[in-house]
Image (tube, grey):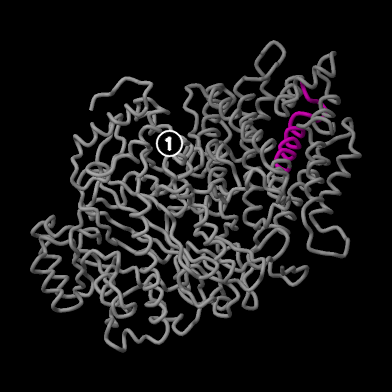
Amino acid sequence: MATQPVLSDPAAQAGRWIADYCAHAGAGGDVLCGGDDAPWAAMFAELASLVGDDLGHARERVQRHAADMGTGFRVAGENEERPWPLSPVPLLIDSDEWRGIERGVIQRAGLLETIITDLYGEARLVSQGLVPPSLIAGSQYYLRQLVGLTPPGRHHLHFLAVDLGRGPTGEWRVLADHLRAPVGAGYALENRLAVSRTLGGLQARLNVARHAPFFAAFRDGLAALCRRSDPRIGLLTPGRYNASYAEQAHLARYLGLLLVEGADLAALEDKVYVRTIGGLKRIDALWRRLDPRFLDPLAFDTHSQIGVPGLIDAYAAGNVVLSNAPGVGVLEAPAWHAFLPQLSTRLTGADLSLPNIATWWCGQDRERARVEEDLANLIIAPAFGSGTLGLPDDAPIAGGDLTPVQRDALLADMARRPQDYVGQEIVRLSTMPVVSGHDLVARPFNLRVFAARGADGAWTVLPGGFARIGERPDPRAAVMGEGSWSADVVVHGRQRVDPISLLPAPDSHHVRRNPGTLPSRVADNLFWLGRYLERGEALLAILRVMLGNSIDADGGAALGPDTVGRLVGLVAGAGAAPAPASLARADLRQMARIAMESTGGEWQSVAEINRHARRIGDGSRDRLSADVMRLLDAPFPSHRGMLDRAGSLQRRYAAIAGLSAEHMSRTAAWRFHDLGRRIERAGAIVRATRAFGLPGASLDDLSTLLDLADSQISYRQRYLTGLARVPVVDLVALDPGNPRALAFQVERICEHVAALPVLDDDGMAEPQQAEATELKAIVSIARAAMLDADTLNELERRLGRLSDAVARRYFLQGAEPLRASGLTLA
C-alpha cells in the first residue's frame, strides 16, 4: 500500500485505509471486510484526525502511552522486562454480538463451578461414570488435601478467563479456560487506558462499554465473602520475576488492593496477617497469582519458599478468602474439552452456547483410534497441559507438521501412555487489521474474555477483554501461540454509556488522607533504594574528583598525591575497586573504570549499585512512579569518556532524588526512602570529613571535602578569604542549614524516626528513637575545631547501629514480627 499524503478530511482518509486494507485482506474471515464497516470507519476517522495518514506514528504514539504507564511483561528465562506490544487499532465488536459471547461465558462459568464443586465434594460425576477417574488423577493441579473442604462463600471460582477464537464465518468457539491465576485483566485495562489517550474521541463516536463496573463488581464480590465489614484485601504475587508482575502491580493500584508476597504474610491462630511497620494487620481476602502448590508448605509442597505456612488452615476455618480456590486448575486440562459438551447437557439441560473446539481424549480406546487414523488433520496436544514425551518441546503441534521420526515417536508414546494426549480439530481464525510499518495488514487473532462474581454472587463479564494478534498470516490457532501484539477490544452500541470509572470523580467529596497499610517488605525496599541511590551518587563524586574534575578548584590544578591517595582509599574502602599499584594516571583510570563499570558482584561498583537499585525498584513498582522506574531502568551511559559517563549518571541520580523529593507524598513510604538516603549520606560525609578535614589537612584536602559535600559555592559565598579547615569542617559537618551537611542529615533522621509508628505504649523511647536522639546530641555539642577521628568513628558506628535498629524494628526478620512483646493484631 502506498503512503498517502496528510489530508484534512479524516473520513476520506479512513475510507482509503479500509479500501486498501480489504483489497489486500479479502472479505473471507476478516472482521472488517465483508460486513458493516461504519464503526470501523468512525474509528479510523478518529485515528486519522490525530495522525493524518501516518499509521506508523499512531503505533509509536500508543506504544508511548503504554510505556508511560509502565506496562511490560517478562519472558521466562529473561531478566529484563519487555515493552508491552500494543496495536493502535482496536478490535471492534457490536453489542448485539457481544451479548451472545457474554451469555456463553456466564453459562460456562456456572458449569465449571458445578463440576469443581462435585470433584472436591461428593464426586458423583466419577461414581456415575460421567468422568473417568484418570481425568482427575492425571492432573498435577488436583489437590487431594482439599477434598471435602467448603470454601468461604461456598464458591470455588470468583474470577476466570476464557480464550475464544472466531472462525471465518463469524462463529466463536472456546480455545482454553484459565482458572488457577487468570492473567490479562490488567493488560486489558492498560490497553484501554493507552488507546483512550490516543483515540480520545472514540467513546463519543461509538458509545464504548466501560471496564470500571466489572472491576468494581469483582472487588465488591470479594469483600462480600469476608467476615469483617471493612475487609483488607490483598493481591498475592509470586514477586517481581513473575512474567506478569507489571500487570499485577497495575491491578493492585487500580483496585486499591495491597500487593503482597508470601513473606509479607503470617498465619496465626487460623487468621492471616500482613507484616507491616505498625505490627500485624489482619488480611481478609487474597486474589492470588501464586501457583496453588506453593501456597502453603504445610499443606502442599514442603519445599516452597514463597508460601505462607498455615494459610490453608485459615482458609479452612473461613477466615481468609482465596480467589480462586486452590485446586480449580484441574479443569484447565485440554482433556476436559472432550467431556464438557455432554456434561453441560446433563448438568444444565442445555448445550454449550459457546462450543469447545472438537476434542478427543486418547485415554479412551475409540477416541485414540480416531486420533491415530486422522493424525495428519488434527492438532495433537498434551492432555493435561504438559508432561508428554512424544511431542516436540512438549507443546501442541499439527499432526501434518510432524516429521516421520517425530510421528513414530509420538505414536510409540501414545501407545504407552495414551491418556497423556488429546487430538483437536484445526481451528482457523478470523483476521483483523494491525499496523505493520506504515501499512495495515491482516493477522489472525484470538480473544481473552474475563468473568467475575459480584457482591450478589452472580457472574459479570468484562466488556471487551484483550485480543492477541499473531505474528504471521497463518490463521491456525495452534501456530499463533501467545501472539506478538495485543489490541484493545471495544464493545460498541447504539445506546449512550455513562462515564463510570474507579478513579475518583472530579466533584467527589470523599477525602482520605490515610495512605493505607505499608508492608514491612516495602518499607525495607524503599529504605535500601534510598541508600543505594545515595551510595552511587557519593561514589561517583569521589571518582569525578579523583579523575581531575574538581569543581571550582583554584586554577584547576591537579590534586596532590596525598589527597589522591585518600580518594583512592575511599574507593577501595567502599569495596568498589582494588587499590591501584601506583597513583599514575593510567592506574587511576583503570581503578575508576572498575569502580564504575565492573559487573558480576566482585566489586560494589556504580554498575552493581545501579543493578541493586533497579532490582529493588522492580519489586516496589506499585509504590514508584513511571518516571522513577524509567530512570532506574535506563541503560548504563555509553559516553566515550569516563567523566562524561559519571556526570550523566550523577544527573540521573539527581533526577530521581528530585522526583522523590517533589512527587512522593509525605507518607511512611517516603519517610523510609528518605531515611535511607539520610543515613547513607551522613555516613559518606563522616568518612569524607575523616579523610580530608582533620588537623593538618591541605588546601587540596579541603577543596576535595567541599567537592564531595557539594558545598563549594556555599563556602565561597560565606567566606571570601580562601580555604580554612575549621570553617570548611563546620560547613560540611555541623551546619544544620546546609542540606549536604552531617547536622542537616541528623535533623532529618530524627524527624523521620519520631514520625514512624511505635509498638510499645509505655511512652518510653524505642531503640531506634534512642539511637537517633543520642546521635543528634553528639552532633549538637560538637565543635569544628575539636572534631577528631575518635568522634567521627563514633558517629559512624552510631549510624550503623541506628540502621540496624530501624531494620530490626520495622523490616522482616524471619519470625521476629510474631514476637509477643508489643504485638498488635488489627
Q: Is residue 225 magenta?
A: no
Q: Is residue 566 above or below residue 256?
A: above
In what quadrant of the picture does the N terminus appear? top left
Asked which quadrant contains residue 277, the reply is bottom right
Q: Is residue 293 left or right of residue 654?
A: left
Q: Relative to 640, does residue 495 appear above or below in the rendering?
A: below
Q: Is residue 697 magenta?
A: yes
Q: Secondary structure at mark 1?
A: helix
> Relative to the observer, which residue lies in front, 181 or 757?
181
User: 30 or 76, which is in the foreground?
Assistant: 30
Label 1 CA crowd tier, 10 Å (few <14, some 14–19, many 20+): many
* Residue that mark 1 sits on: 62
Is residue 29 toward the left or the right of residue 229 in the image? left
Amino acid type, label 1: Val
Task: Please indicate whether residue 638 sits to the left or right of residue 758 in the image.
Answer: left
Overall secondary structure of the magenta stretch? helix
Residue 591, located in which quarter of the rendered image? top right
Q: Residue furthest top?
A: 555
Q: Position of residue 118 (x, y in %)?
A: 39, 82
Position in image of residue 728 (x %, y %): 81, 25
Expressed as whole percent of the image width and height from the top left, the position of residue 96 reads: 35, 54
Specify the segment rendered in magenta. 679-698
Residue drawn at point x = 47 percent, y = 52 percent = 186
Residue that extends furthest to the front in the rendered view of this protein: 495
Counting the numbered discs, the total is 1
Where is residue 442? Give x, y as percent. 24, 40
Question: Nearest the camera: 674 or 661?
Answer: 661
